[in-house]
Image (cartoon, rainbow, N blue to C red):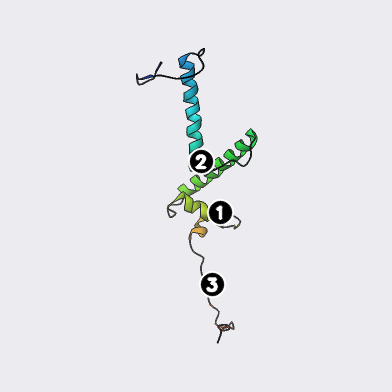
């Protein structure tokens, strides 16, 4: 049995009869923090599965996702016209290779003026 900070007593069931209850409770608490982190990774960073199986591959994938999330979140704060982070991420993804300011990405492109001197053909079937 372990008494937590609220005064409540928790009974811990384990097969390790040699370890003290406080140590086992601390291990469960750390494990729960890891579970909460992975839930946040899945929900917020949209990582559904890991591409690699090694520790290094998982670390790299999480770090890249964190960097992308932080960059998008900081850029999103400067833009009040885009309502959701997902819409902002789609806008950035669609225009990733275009050299434009974010403001120019938000506003629709201006239609070029029509040149009346240019010949136009009616290509509809008759």
Q: Residue at x 46, y 16 (%)?
A: 22
What's the residue at 58%, 54% (across, down)? 96
Q: Counting other residues with Cα less than 10 Å from the Cα at mark 2, is it few (<14), some (14-19), or many (20 or more)?
A: few
Q: Earlier in the sequence, mark 1 or mark 2?
A: 2
> Residue drawn at (51%, 39%), measured in percent from left and top?
41
**Label 1 belongs to which residue?**
93
Q: Position of residue 92 (x, y in %)?
A: 54, 53
Residue at the far front: name it.
15
Residues 84 and 13: in front is 13
Crowdedness of circle 3 by 10 Å Cα count: few (<14), some, many (20+)?
Answer: few
State which mark lies toward you, 1 or 2. Answer: 2
Q: Which residue is mark 2?
A: 42
Q: Secondary structure at mark 3?
A: loop
How far apart marks 3 and 1 lie (CA) works out to: 25 Å
Q: Could you tell me residue 112's position as x and y percent?
A: 54, 72
Q: Name above or below for residue 46 compared with residue 7.
A: below
SS class, disc 2: helix
Front position in the image: 51 or 45: 51
Query: Badge 3 is on which residue?
Result: 112
Q: In the image, 22: left or right of 115?
A: left
Where is the C terminus found, in terms of image quarters?
bottom right
- Name the side, left or right, on which 5 lies relative to 24: left
In the rendered image, residue 91, in percent from the top left (x then y), is placed at 52, 55
């Amino acid at each position: 049995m372990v008494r937590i900070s609220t005064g409540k007593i928790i009974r811990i069931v384990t097969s390790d009869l040699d370890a003290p209850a406080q140590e086992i409770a601390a291990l469960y608490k750390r494990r729960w923090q890891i579970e909460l982190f992975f839930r946040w990774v899945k929900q917020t960073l949209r990582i559904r599965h890991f591409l690699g199986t090694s520790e290094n591959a998982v670390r790299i994938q999480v770090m890249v996702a964190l960097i992308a999330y932080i960059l998008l979140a900081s850029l999103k704060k400067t833009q009040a016209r885009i309502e959701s982070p997902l819409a902002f991420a789609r806008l950035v993804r669609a225009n990733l290779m275009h050299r434009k300011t974010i403001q120019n990405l938000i506003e629709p492109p201006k239609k070029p003026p029509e040149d009346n001197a240019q010949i136009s053909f009616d290509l509809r079937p008759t």
